[in-house]
Image: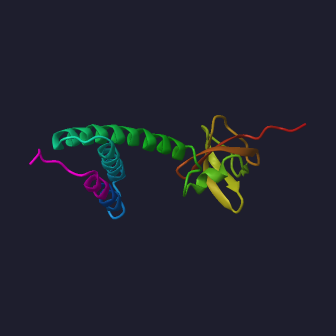
Amino acid sequence: MGPPTLTPWAWAVAAVVIAFLELPVPGSYLIWIACAAALTALAGFVIGWSLSAQLTFFVVACIGTCVAGYFVYRHLDRRGKEAEPVNRRDLDLVGVAATATEAFANGQGRVRLGDTVWLAECGEDLAAGTPVTVTAVRGTTLVVARKARTP
């Protein structure tokens, strides 16, 4: 009787089981451990080795696939931040024209945008009726600038 070992089929079944565990337990890393088990199964079909060699290969493969997974998810996360923000309707106001409804004092005033009067901030004092453009939104306050005159 030789040293204890696992067949490559045992590693393949383990890979499938671990991959299916990713479905109800979405931790995003079980799939990489399943990949390591699959690599161990593939290597086991090519190389006949002892249980300790299989376990060593599996641990090294786990580390490698989890590190690869980190970079994959990091890339996906970076790509997701460049996408349109969800539930940020206030950003739709940036670039919209409005009118000062009262004179701005110390950079503070109110502007009419559509049928709503908003608190507003501006880098300069403005007279009532001055056309402005929304440049940013801070909570419920619009940051505005004097609308550029077109010739």
Q: In the figure, is residue 129 to the left or right of 120?
A: right
- Residue 69 percent coordinates (x, y): 39, 43
Query: Is residue 21 placed above or below 60 in the rendered structure?
Result: below
Residue in view at x 72 percent, y 60 percent? 114
Residue 9 magenta? yes
Residue at the farthest right position: 151
Is 61 magenta? The answer is: no
Quick check: 99 left or right of 91? right
Rendering coords of residue 116 (x, y %): 66, 60
Q: Between 131 and 88, which is closer to the camera in this rendering?
A: 88
Residue situated in front as seen by the camera: 92 or 111:
92
- Quadrant of the rendering where the C terminus is positioned: top right
Residue sticking out furthest to the top: 123
Q: Residue at x 73, y 47 (%)?
A: 128
Q: Position of residue 117 (x, y in %)?
A: 65, 57
Measured from the top left, where is residue 89 in percent x and y? Answer: 60, 56
Describe residue 150's horizontal placement relative to residue 91 as left or right.
right
The quarter of the displayed image where residue 60 is located: top left
- Who is closer to the viewer here, 99 or 71? 71
Q: Residue at x 13, y 47 (%)?
A: 4
Instruction: Locate residue 57: give its quadrant.
Output: top left
Magenta residues, start to end: 1-14
